[in-house]
Amino acid sequence: KNGIVRPKGYNVSWHSNPEIEKHHFGHAHPMKPWRLTLAKSLIMSYGMHTAMDTYVSRLATREELEDFHSEDYLDYLKTAKVAMPDDETPKDYNLGGSDCPIFEGLFNYCSMYAGASIDAARKLCNNESDIAINWSGGLHHAKKAEASGFCYVNDIVLAILQLLRKHPRVLYIDIDVHHGDGVEEAFWSTDRVMTLSMHKYDGLNFFPGTGDLDRTGPDNEGNPGAHHAINVPLSDGIDDEQYVWLFTTIVGRCVDKFQPTAIVLQCGADSLAGDRLGRFNVQVQGHGACVAYCKSLKLPLLLIGGGGYTPRNVARAWAHETSIAIGCDETLDPIIPEHTPYREHFRHDTLFPTLEQILGEPRVNRNTKKKVDEIVSTITEQLRFVNG
Ligand code: VJV
Ligand code: CA
Ligand code: ZN
C-alpha cells in the first residue's frame, strides 16, 4: 500500500474503535454506524493512516459521562432493555422511539464514541496533536437527561468541557444539516464557548425545529452567554458557492471578535447533496473547503463526524477531509484505488468511482442573495456585543 508522507512537525491524530461500526439502530433506520467502515476503507486504501497517529479509543468512564449527563439518565441508558420491535412511542428520557431506539450494546456504543471525542480533545490539550479526528462522534442533539435525534450522549459537549480545562475560549462550528441544539443549549450561559450552526430551517417542519437567526442566547440580566449563539438558517438547495462564502465570512468574523484558542468543527455529512435526510446541494469540495478554512486559522482543531445518511458520500467527504487535515488532498488520485475494500459501493454513480464527484440530483436553490446578505449583516451586528 502506498504510504503518504507525514508532514514534519505537524501532528494529526485519528481516534476510532472498530467496535462502534458493528452497532445497528435497527432495520431501515437512517443512522448506520457501518458508514464508518466505509470511510475507514477509503482512508486506509489511500494510505492516509500512515501519516497520522492512530489510536483505538477507549470507553468513556462513568465519571467522564457525568461531566454533562445526569446520573439518573445514565442509569436508565445503561439498563434500558430492547423494546418490542413494533413499539414506536418514545418512553422515558425520549428513549425507545423510532428516532432513538434501544438496541443491543447501546451503552457501549455511546461510551465508545464519547471516549474517542474525549481522547481527541486531550491530545489537543497537551499539544500532542494539531488536529484530532473522531468521525464516530458529533452527536449534537443529546441533552443532559434526554436522548434526541439519533443522539444519546453528547460527546461534543464532553470534548469541549475537556478543552475548557486548558483553553479560555472555544469556538464550536456545526455544518451538519440539522441545528446543533444540544451543544448550543449546554453552553447557553457561558461566554467561554461560542456556538455557530449552519442548518436547514423551516419553522417546525424540519428537525429539531430550532435555530432561527434571532436565537442568539438568553439575554436576561447578567448572562455572560448572551449573543454567543450564532445561527445560520438556510433553505433547500444551497450550493457550494453560497455555502462556502457564508462559512468563511461568518467564521472569519467570529474568530476576529471572539479570539478562540481552540476550534471544534462538527462535520455532519448530511449537508451534502444527495443525502437521504438532507436538503442541500453542497458537494464534497464545498464541505471540505470549510475544513480547509478552519485548518488555515492555525488553532488546535477537533474534527468530529455527525449526521450523514448516504453512506458512500459520507465516506467520500470524511476521507477527503482527512486528507485536508494531513495536507495531502492535492496529491490524492481522484479515482478510488483498485484495491479499496467495498469499492463497488462507490461505483453507484459512475463507471470509475471517484472521491470528488457531483453528488445527487441537483435541487432548486431556494436561498436568495438578499437573504444570504441579510444573514451576514444580522450576525455582524450581533458580534458587536462579543469580546475576545
Ligand atoms: O423529525 C424527526 C421526529 C419525528 C418523529 C419520529 N419520526 C420517525 C420522524 C419524525 C419528528 N426526527 C428526525 C431526527 C433527525 C436526527 C438527525 C441527527 C443528526 O444528523 O443531526 C446528528 C447525528 C428524523 N428525520 C428523519 C427521521 N428522523 C427518520 C427516522 C427513522 C426512519 C426514517 C426517518 C427511524 C427509523 C426508521 N426510519 C426505520
Ligand atoms: Ca448544523
Ligand atoms: Zn444531521
Image (tube, rainbow, N blue to C red):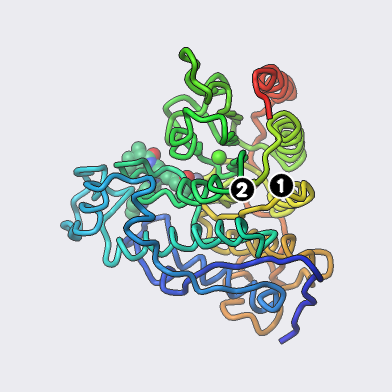
Q: CA distance from mark 2 to mark 1?
A: 9 Å
Q: Is residue 221 left or right of residue 353?
A: left
Seen at 36% across and 64% down, the residue is: 109
Q: Amino acid at mark 2?
A: Leu
Please identify the quarter of the rendering in which residue 102 is found: bottom left
Seen at 76% across and 35% down, the residue is: 252
State which quarter of the image contains the C terminus.
top right
Residue at the far right: name it.
331
Can residue 267 be seen here? The reply is: yes
Q: Is mark 1 within 8 Å of ligand 2?
A: no
> Can you tell which of label 2 and label 1 is closer to the viewer?
2
> Mark on residue 265?
2
Secondary element at tag 1: helix
Q: Is residue 222 left or right of residue 376?
A: left
Residue at the far bottom: name it.
1
Seen at 69% across and 18% down, the residue is: 384
Q: Position of residue 216 (x, y in %)?
A: 55, 23
Q: Using the image as rendered, state which of residue 215 and residue 103 is in the foreground.
A: 215
Can residue 276 be seen here? The reply is: no
Point out the quarter of the image occupied by ligand 2.
top right
- Disc 1: CA contacts within 10 A as few (<14), some (14-19) or many (>=20): many
N-term-proximal mark, 2 vs 1: 2
Seen at 39% across and 66% down, the residue is: 59
Is 127 placed above or below 200 here? below
Q: Amino acid at mark 1?
A: Cys
Secondary element at tag 2: strand
Q: Is residue 196 left or right of residue 104?
A: right
Is 318 placed above or below 197 here? below
Mark 1 lies on residue: 290
State which quarter of the image contains the N terminus.
bottom right
Q: Using the image as rendered, state which of residue 89 and residue 268 is in the foreground.
A: 268
